[in-house]
C-alpha cells in the first residue's frame, strides 16, 4: 500500500489550454474524491466516484471540467480552456466504506498555475 | 448548507506550550469530524477522526473532542514542538442524503517557535 498518488505534482499552462490530472487511489478503495484548494482556504469538494460511477458533482464543477474513473481504479480530471481562476491545488482522496470510519486519505495534490 | 469555521486563523506559540485549536460547524447532523494536518504545498494527513457518537479521540500528544449539540470541536496539542508547525484543518461529513464529501474549515496556521 503506497498511499494515494497524483500526477503531475505541478503543472504550468497558458490560458485556454487543456490539462489533465491523474489520481491513483489506495488499491482496495472503492471511493474516490476530487477537491480543489486555493491559497489560504480549505479544500472544496468537486466530485465523488463509487467504483466507476460518478455519484455526485459540486456546482463548482463547471462544464469545462470533466472527471472519469473508467475501470473503478485510477481517475482523471480534465479542465478544458483553462482560465486564470482555475489556478489552485487539486487534491484527490480515496476511502473504503467499512462499518466504522470511511476515512478519506489524501494524495499530495497537483498544483496548477494558469498564466 | 454546512459551514465550518476555524479560529484563530493563525497562532504562534513557544515550544513546549500546550495549545487548543477550535472548530465550529453550523449543522449538528454530522456523520463524523476529522482533523488534518497540511504542510506548505503538500497534501493532507489525517490526524484524528471522531464519529458522531463519540466525544473524543486521542493519538499521542493530540486529543480531539466533539460536542455535536453546540457544533464545536477542539484539537488539543500537548507539549508543542517546532515540528508541529503546519496548517491544521477540521472537516465534517454530513449524515443526511447521499453526500459523501467533507466540508472543510479554512484552517489554523500554527507556528511553534524553538
Image: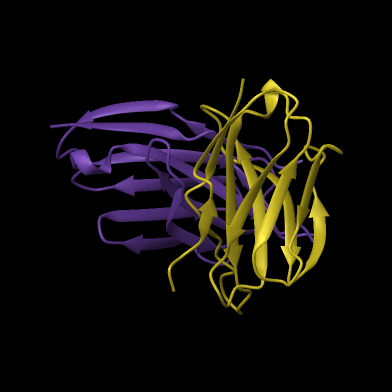
Q: Is A113 placed above or below B33 here? A: above
Q: Quadrant of the C terminus of chain B?
A: top left
**Which of the 4 image quadrants contains residue A102?**
bottom right
Q: Is residue B42 left or right of residue A16?
A: left
Residue B14 or B67: which is nearer the viewer? B14
Residue A35 percent location from the top left of the image: 64, 46
One can see residue B97 in this view: no
Residue A81 percent location from the top left of the image: 78, 30
Q: Quadrant of the N terminus of chain B?
A: top right
Residue B63 percent location from the top left of the image: 35, 55
Say which residue appears at 54% left-offset and 43% top-offset: A110
Number of numbered discs on residues: 0
Residue A37 or A64: which is nearer the viewer? A64
Residue B91 or B58: which is nearer the viewer? B91
Q: Is A38 placed above or below A22 here? A: above
Q: Is B76 placed above or below A115 here? A: below
Say which residue appears at 60% left-offset and 73% top-offset: A29
One can see residue B41 in this view: yes
Residue B64 or A96: which is nearer the viewer? A96
Q: Is residue A59 left or right of residue B80?
A: right
Residue A94 percent location from the top left of the image: 59, 63
* Chain letter, purple: B
Say which residue appears at 25% left-offset and 55% top-offset: B61
Q: Is residue A95 left or right of residue B56?
A: right
Colour assigned to chain A in the rendering is yellow
Q: Is A44 placed above or below A49 here? A: above
**Which of the 4 image quadrants contains residue A98?**
bottom right
Q: How is the image coloured?
A: by chain
Amino acid at each position: 500500500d503506497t498511499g494515494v498518488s497524483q500526477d503531475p505534482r505541478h503543472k504550468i499552462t497558458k490560458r485556454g489550454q487543456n490539462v489533465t490530472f491523474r489520481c491513483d487511489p489506495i488499491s482496495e478503495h472503492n471511493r474516490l474524491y476530487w477537491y480543489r484548494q486555493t491559497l489560504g482556504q480549505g479544500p472544496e469538494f468537486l466530485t465523488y466516484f463509487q467504483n466507476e460511477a460518478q455519484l455526485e458533482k459540486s456546482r463548482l464543477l463547471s462544464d469545462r471540467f470533466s472527471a472519469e474513473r473508467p475501470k473503478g481504479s485510477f481517475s482523471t480530471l480534465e479542465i478544458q480552456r483553462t482560465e486564470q481562476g482555475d489556478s489552485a491545488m487539486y487534491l484527490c482522496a480515496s476511502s473504503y466504506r467499512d462499518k466504522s470510519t470511511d476515512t478519506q486519505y489524501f494524495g499530495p495534490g497537483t498544483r496548477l498555475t494558469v498564466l | 448548507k454546512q459551514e465550518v469555521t476555524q479560529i484563530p486563523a493563525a497562532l504562534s506559540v513557544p515550544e513546549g506550550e500546550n495549545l487548543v485549536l477550535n472548530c465550529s460547524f453550523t449543522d449538528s447532523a454530522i456523520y463524523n469530524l476529522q482533523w488534518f494536518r497540511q504542510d506548505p504545498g503538500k497534501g493532507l494527513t489525517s490526524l484524528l477522526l471522531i464519529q458522531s457518537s463519540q466525544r473524543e479521540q486521542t493519538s499521542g500528544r493530540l486529543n480531539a473532542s466533539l460536542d455535536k449539540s453546540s457544533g464545536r470541536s477542539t484539537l488539543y496539542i500537548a507539549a508543542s514542538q517546532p515540528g508541529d508547525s503546519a496548517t491544521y484543518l477540521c472537516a465534517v461529513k454530513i449524515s443526511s442524503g447521499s453526500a459523501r464529501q467533507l466540508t472543510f474549515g479554512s484552517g489554523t496556521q500554527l507556528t511553534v517557535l524553538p
